[in-house]
Amino acid sequence: MNKREMVAKAIKGDSDGRTPVYGWVSANLDKEISEEFGSVRNFEDKYDFDLAHIFGGPKPYKKDQFTELIESGTEITPEMVLDIPMQPPDDETALFNVKKSLEYYQVDRGRFCYMQTPGIFEFHNEVFGMENHMIQMMVEKEMMKEVYKRQAEWNKKYAEAIIELGMDMIHISDDWGAQNDLMFSKEMWLDMILPNTKITADYVKSTGTFLSLHSDGNINRVLPEVRELGFDVLHPWQEAAGMSYDTYLSDYSNDFGIMGGLCIQTTLGFGDFENVRNEIERVFGLLKGKRWIFCTTHFVQEHCSIEELVFAYDIAVKMARL
């Protein structure tokens, strides 16, 4: 059984006992990892990662289109956004780097590949600036629905183009959670975010492609809807934000898998090697053999030493492949 098949079986709940391994290791530690291993890819090869997280591809708007306005203090309104044309989601030139990534990770390395796509809420924090975005959601609710609907239709076409390239899973990144609850009311989420997330989710599921969600924080209150949307994987299941593994195992483990287990908020990067060991062993004790992919809960932070990162993955890989 190859890696792609093994990961697919784990997601579906048909694990053979081996836990797929991955890690968001690159964003803050590129330089340090490259100095130690020659490249981030060499680190991934050392631990024979089973998955690859693909970035790149077309962008909804031209680079830095809103940056100057935000930095100048201009309040960006929904009307302004709707007047700006979006770029083609299936642009062949922009998709070239995605094809190259698939050739390397999926063809050459045999890894299960998933691709980052814009979330309805998270993406528009970049467009409006987060504070202004939250204000616009309240004072220009109907216009914001139009902005979100246009983005949702773009996302659907983007997902279509990526799936045609052979991507194993479409990954929607949309941070809805704060430390203890949603960043907005559930009523607002149901009215504004859910219908537009559903446009992409329904299309992806109709093709038979796996669908995953990344959302930081506590999203307990919308988990029933996440299940109804048909997500196959949720990253992370964030214990540090009040999401208990007991709740997952009792209420949701028959519906979707989870990716995570190595918390960058409480465990990795604090120099406490014994705590790292204990936490990895604890989580494996709870989740091994379940619908689980071992991964960091987010990008490893810059205060994590290479020694600690290696220590963690030496333990995790050994436990995953027993």
Image: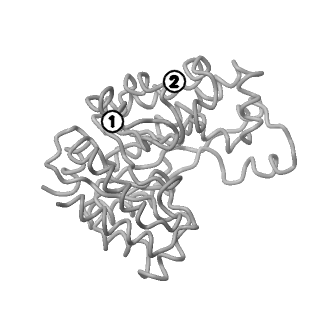
Q: Which mark is residue 232?
A: 1
Q: Is residue 82 above or below residue 304?
A: above
Would you identify the image quadrant in which residue 292 lies? top left
User: Residue 39 at x, y = what percent?
Assistant: 44, 77
Q: Earlier in the sequence, mark 2 or mark 1?
A: 2
Q: Which mark is residue 160?
A: none
Distance between the alpha carbons at the discs numbered 2 and 1: 16 Å
Rendered-image quadrant of the C terminus: bottom left
For the point 49% across and 53% down, the residue is: 298
Please give left or right for residue 42 compared with residue 120 in the image: left
| Numbered disc 2: secondary structure | helix
The number of numbered badges drawn on the structure is 2
Other residues around mark 2 within 10 Å, as few (<14) / some (14–19) / many (≥20): some
Residues at circles 2 and 1 in contact by the CB criterion of under 8 Å = no
Out of 163 and 182, give the one closest to the viewer: 182
Out of 111 and 320, give the one closest to the viewer: 320
Would you identify the image quadrant in which residue 40 lies? bottom left
Q: Amino acid at mark 2?
A: Leu
Please give left or right for residue 262 compared with residue 61 in the image: left
Q: Is residue 69 above or below residue 141?
A: below
User: Residue 166 at x, y = what percent?
Assistant: 31, 49
Please give left or right for residue 117 compared with residue 68 in the image: left
Would you identify the image quadrant in which residue 246 lies? top left
Rendered-image quadrant of the N terminus: bottom left
| Numbered disc 1: secondary structure | loop
In the picture of the structure, the residue carrying the numbered disc 2 is 194
User: Residue 251 at x, y = what percent?
Assistant: 32, 26
Q: Amino acid at mark 1?
A: Asp
Out of 225 and 147, give the one closest to the viewer: 225
